[in-house]
Structures are given as structure tokens and as C-alpha cells.
Amino acid sequence: MNSSRALIVGGGPAGTSAALGFLRAGWNVTLLEQRSESVPRVCGAFLNPEAVRHLAWLGLLDGLGKQGAPVASVRVTGPDGAEAVFPIGHGGFAGLAVARDVLEETLLKAVAAAGGEVHRGRRAGPRARTAAGWTVRARHGAAEEDFSGDALVLADGRFGGPPLPEKKPAEGWFGWNAAFDGVPQPPGALSLHFYFGGYVGLLTFADGTTNVCGLRKRRAGEAGDWDAVFKSALVRSPALAELLSAARRRTPWGGVGPLPFARSLRPSDGALLAGDAGAVADPFMGEGIGRALGAGPLIVEALESARASTLSQTYARLWRHRYRSRFWLGLAARTTLGSVVLFRAVKPLFGWPRAMNALTPLFHGAAAQFATMDVTDSHGRVPCSPSASSKATSSLR
Ligand SMILES: Cc1cc2nc3c(=O)[nH]c(=O)nc-3n(C[C@H](O)[C@H](O)[C@H](O)COP(=O)(O)OP(=O)(O)OC[C@H]3O[C@@H](n4cnc5c(N)ncnc54)[C@H](O)[C@@H]3O)c2cc1C
């Protein structure tokens, strides 16, 4: 154990993975999470193969794999009802359907079990950098306390990180979701339903509950009425309407936005930016949790090749090398979904499996990551049923 200390703000997938990475490198870790307990998140909850592989690296796949349902394919439908089914998998790892609260509790417990100091119910506020390192002031009810570290990781989510220079725009992309019963999809089934101006994803968990999660372009004033957003999605997507015809919503709607999408890692004042605090990507790429869980492996890699004084630059360089290209893909896809002209132009692709087959691996972010990452499955076996990715078959019904 060395005597260096890492201070981490945020106890989501990015903050906990970063904590486990520092602990693995022998650092002392203090993690601050504003919430005392897990709360529902606006998120599709799909873990892509990259995320699953990171869980293996973190030593958590055995437990979470048993609680989740393997996701071996995705069904994609277009606005005219055309559909295609594509395999999901890379390097022997399928995707995984795990509820966010289960994932987050498991990760937080793992940090504490590995010797990290986890402070829940602490909302981090102002931070300062001195020659001796970083200090962050956190609130706990009416009390305030200072925490310090040699390295600081900001993993405080999509509206966290360094302050955003621009004002919240009046129009933008909003995410929404709720849990449903009675959706005729088996556990582990993932379907994505695209239409002009948005999409809806349905992911069914091991207990049969389905997370219905969408993205929609809206004006800020219209944003709160998620029931209206949901109903308009049903009108625009016949496949979605059919799947949800007998389903019952069992949780309140959640919604968030406008989402501050990024094109690459945001500039930092020396803190390491992990997960959404570093850059928010388009949800339909299904890679946000994977990239967040990748913070730990990336930190370990950066620590192996950097001195403490250059850690944040090395981390940022590795981050850009690994992830930057995906953000351009997301921007292209989002622009297409929000433009009548572009959407009409690409609509035929939804009925052309070969084109979709070529594009899907890009959006699931598998290839680039695995080519550069040295990861060993600590259990020495293939943990989720491997998908038929090598066969690369797709069917159009
Ligand atoms: C509509 C939608 C659907 C999505 N679907 C998927 C999907 O299916 N698959 C996928 O991989 N990704 C998906 N994503 C993206 C995914 O949700 C995020 O990329 C992921 O949650 C990022 O993890 P994180 O740890 O960076 O941030 P978060 O999960 O947001 O965690 C941040 C943590 O920091 C804490 N925090 C915030 N401020 C403070 C503070 N001041 N002090 C202390 N703690 C603080 C928060 O309470 C929270 O626990 C989706 C996103 C949206 C919007």
C-alpha cells in the first residue's frame, strides 16, 4: 500500500469503478456520494459487452451475472414497422440486463469491502487545489466537512464535472423512463424502436419487469409531461404500440434534460473526469455505463505509465484515444434522428440488415475498446452466454 490518497466525488458506476481502480493500485480512497440510498435513475440499464467485461475486471460479474439476464441480441424497429434482429457480443461477453439500483448497491459495497472509505449522504461542494493536493467541502444535512486527497476524481454525473459554460438551452434532448409489467418480452430481451424525433428502448430484467426508456427532442417548457411523450411515441411506432398494448406502468415517470451532450472529454483543471462528468454521450449508443465502469481500468493504466504530477494528462490522453471517435458517431445519429430530411434519407437503412449489421458494433462500442485493453476475467471462464457475433447473422422479418 502506498500512502497516496484519491478523493472521489460521485458513487455511480464511474465513481465506484474509479475507486476500485485506485484501491487496486494500492491507494487510499475516500468516496463521497450525495444520496443516502439508491434512487431510480433515468437510464435504459442495458450493460453492453464492454460494461460486462469491466464488471469481470472489477471482480463483480459472478454476483451480478446471477442477478441479471444475459442480453444476446437487439431487435430494432423503424417507423414503418420494418424490423431487424442483431447479435450483441464481443470477446465471449454478451450484454446484461441489471436494474440500476442493484448495480449501484453492488458497486458501492465492493468499494467498502475493498477498504475504501464510503461516505453516503455527503453532497460535495466547492473544491480547492493546493500544493498539497485537493480539498472538497461536503454537506451532510446542516453540517459541513472537508475531505482531501492527492488526486481528485469528478464522477458526479451528467450535470456534474467542471461547470458548464453555456446556459441550459431552451430546446434539446430529454430522457424519460418508467418500469412496466406485462410486456411480452422474455428476460434479457432488448428492443429499440426508432421514429422521427426520438426512440424508445425496452429492456426486460430477470424478474420479468421491463424498463421503458426513451429519448425525445423537446422544448424545455414541454418537457415535464412524460405521459404525453410516451403516448406520442406509441402513435409514431406501431411496433412499440403493439408491444405495450397490454402492459401496465408500475412506477412514476422519471425524466431529465436537456442532456448536455459532449463531443469529447471536457477540459479539466487537473481533476480526473470519469463517466458522464467527463462527457455525456447519446443514450441509444448504450455505452454510457460501460464507459463509466471503464474508469477504473483506465486509471490503473494511467498510473502504470504516469507520475502523480502528470496523472490527469495521461488519463485524458488515454481517454481520448479510446473513446473520442464514438462521440462523433453519436452526434451523427442524433442529428439524423432530429432532422426530417436526414431521417427520410436514412429510413431505408432500417430495412437493410447488411448496413445495420455494419453499424451496430460501432454503436455498441466494442471493437475499439477491446483492442487496447488488457483485461483478464478473474474467473477464467465465459460469464454470459456468448453471443453469435462471429456468425454476424441478422434477420429481417
Ligand atoms: C435516457 C437515457 C438512457 C440511457 N440508457 C443507457 C443504457 O441503456 N446503457 C448505458 O450504458 N447507458 C445509458 N445511459 C447513460 C448512463 O445512464 C450514464 O452514462 C451513466 O449513468 C453514467 O454513470 P456516472 O457514474 O458517470 O454518472 P451517474 O450514474 O449519474 O452517477 C453520478 C453519481 O454522482 C452523485 N453526485 C452527483 N453530484 C454529487 C455531489 N455534488 N456530491 C456527491 N455526489 C454527487 C449522484 O448522486 C450519482 O450517484 C442512458 C442515459 C439516458 C439519459
Image: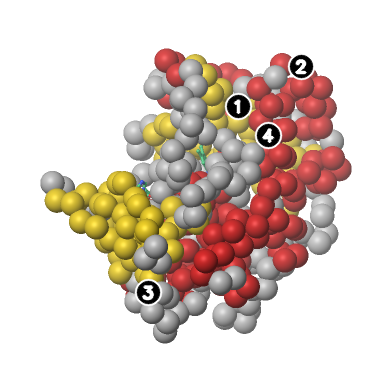
To which quarter of the image does residue 83 belong? Answer: top right
Q: Is residue 51 above or below residue 213?
A: below
Residue that carries the numbered disc 4 in the rendered image: 331
Quadrant containing the N terminus in the rendered view? bottom left
Verify CB contact (< 8 Å) between mark 1 and mark 3: no
Residue that carries the numbered disc 3 in the rendered image: 28
Task: Work out whether mark 1 precedes mark 2 in sequence or the reverse, and give the earlier one.
Answer: 1
Q: Nearer the viewer, mark 1 or mark 2?
A: 2
3D distance between C-alphas at marks 1 and 3: 44 Å
Label 2: how many Cα within 10 Å (few below 14, some 14–19, many 20+): few
Q: Which mark is residue 198?
A: 1
Task: Work out whether mark 1 precedes mark 3 in sequence or the reverse, and give the earlier one.
Answer: 3
3D distance between C-alphas at marks 1 and 4: 14 Å
3D distance between C-alphas at marks 4 and 2: 16 Å
Task: Work out whether mark 1 precedes mark 4 in sequence or the reverse, and give the earlier one.
Answer: 1
**Whole-percent x, y for residue 229 in the image:** 48, 22
Q: Amino acid at mark 2?
A: Val
